[in-house]
Image (spheres, rainbow, N blue to C red):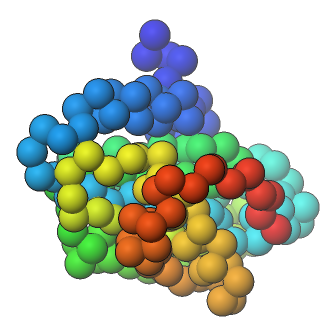
Amino acid sequence: RNITLIDPLTGLLNRRALTAQIERKSRHLGHGPQQNALLVLDLDHFKSVNDRYGHDIGDQVLAAFSAVAEAQTRPADRLYRLGGEEFCILLPDTDMREALAVAEGIRRAFAACIVETERGERVSATLSIGIAATKFAGFDLELLLAAADAALYEAKARGRNRIVVADTEALRRSSAAPPQPDRRRA
């Protein structure tokens, strides 16, 4: 069972594991106040890394990101590879200030990370991050994911290699709104 929840390239939990976590969390709604934050991270211009250096180097960049993210997070944080170059991190018992500190640590460390090719070329990449957080118990984790994803799109629209925080008041107002279809990133 555990093998089906792990991404083989990065060693991180996968989308299936995130879905299971969402189901577990939804069963425990309202069991005391707990702040949660969620980061959605996407490597910037990753297709150009694969196109220029090949998929083997792209895989090395993804593995390097995984190592950087694991080094910058806390033991209780949960990292997931959603697919391709998109990741998310669930930060339990975390307020926005702490979430921003974790996100900035990952962003800076990954921007400084270099993968060297067999030909001696130095490959680096940046990432964009969307953050959503809640101060109240019983918050829908799927809605938190959608809000962080929307903030990620805004980070990309603002020029990439940055962090954008979702508007949590808008989250509360839109909690009854139907889910939006997934859009592809450039």
Q: What percent of the width, then of the height, locates residue 184?
A: 80, 58
Q: Is residue 185 left or right of residue 140?
A: right
Residue 165 against residue 15 in the figure, above or below: below
Name the residue at 60% across, 80% down.
Answer: 155
Name the residue at 39% across, 47% down.
Answer: 140
Q: What percent of the width, then of the height, locates residue 144?
A: 44, 56
Query: Residue 4: which quarter of the image?
Result: top right
Name the residue at 54% across, 28% down.
Answer: 16
User: Foreground: 146 or 157?
Assistant: 146
Q: What percent of the width, then of the height, locates residue 106?
A: 41, 69
Residue 59 against residue 20 in the figure, above or below: below
Residue 86 against residue 7 in the figure, above or below: below
**Residue reaching furthest to the left:** 32
Exactly how many numbered labels are in the figure? Answer: 0
Name the residue at 77% across, 58% down.
Answer: 183
Q: In which quarter of the image is the C terminus?
A: bottom right
Residue 164 visible in the current orientation: yes
